[in-house]
Amino acid sequence: MLTLQSDLHGNHLLGALPSHEWQALAPHLELVNLRTEQLLCDSGQRIHHVYFPTTAIISMLSTMEDGSSVEIAAVGREGMTGVPVLTGGETMPNRVQVQCAGFAYRMSAQSLKQQFARSDFLRRLMLLYMHALLTQVAQTAACNRHHSLSKQLCRWLLIEVDRVASNDLTVTQQLIADMLGVRREGITEAAGKLHDEGLIHHSRGRIRVLDREGLEARACECYGLVRREFDRLLPRLRQAETVE
């Protein structure tokens, strides 16, 4: 059981809660260690638990009939999984799988629904998060269709370092290729160019961002648009809580 509100600050949604709200939620939260490629919920499966990542990154994957898949959103410390339980959907339309190992707070879907029904603040917070998440999903679809692989890779790397709050990523080029739905050779070539330009350093299974500003300059507008939307919507709840 969580005893301090500071325990929640690893996740931005939980950290935005007023003290009386987190006191109601805390007994239902369990800190769990998630492993890479762990399946949390499959497409069409009933949602039993939601996850609020702190250091883990969780991918929402759209899977085709031939078994291929592409990432439609990444969820890290800024958000949560399982939002359909709050809209009455009950099941996931896509696969939810751990992309990068780490910690998250797990909560039963039923407990979250009960708190959602009782709390005006939690409803406002979750609805704003859903808005931001939908922006990410829509912009990812547009980016994958219209922008070069190099720009997509820059966007993806920037999202990842935001999610883990670190410039060091434990990730293979094959994983990146799987997330973007492209061939690994394309990622190898694009990452090699970023490496040669001094923007990143990559070695087997690891990538370090060396020049964030340079990477942002190479990325398409999709990264900035989605980040601005998250920054615009979610801090307003933290500001509102201080004056209520």
Image (cartoon, grey):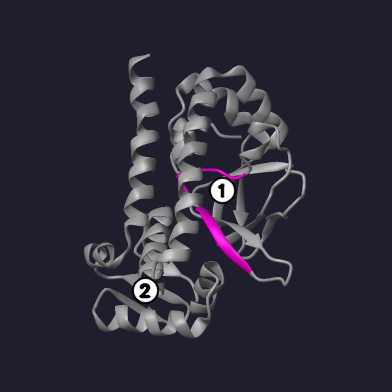
- Give the image location of residue 8, x and y in percent: 48, 37
- Would you place residue 25 above or below residue 134 in this image? above
Which region of the structure is painted magenta? 69-81
Give residue 187's position: percent from left, percent from top. 45, 79
The answer to whether any part of residue 101 appears in the image is: no
**In which quadrant of the rendered view does residue 23 lie?**
top right
Numbered disc 1: secondary structure: strand
**Where's the N terminus, which quadrant?**
top right
**Is residue 231 rendered to the left or right of residue 211?**
right
Q: Is residue 6 left or right of residue 85?
A: left
- The type of residue carrying mark 1 is Ala
Q: Residue 150 shows which numbered tag?
A: 2
Q: Is residue 114 above or below residue 200?
A: above
Q: Within 10 Å of the Cα at label 1, are there few (<14), some (14-19), or many (20+) other Cα atoms?
A: many
User: Where in the figure is residue 174, as x and y percent of width and height?
Assistant: 54, 78
* Extreme-top residue of the structure: 244
Residue 216 is covered by the magenta coloring: no
Q: Nearer the viewer, mark 1 or mark 2?
A: 2
Quarter of the image for residue 196 reads bottom left
Q: Are marks 1 and 2 in contact (CB under 8 Å)?
A: no
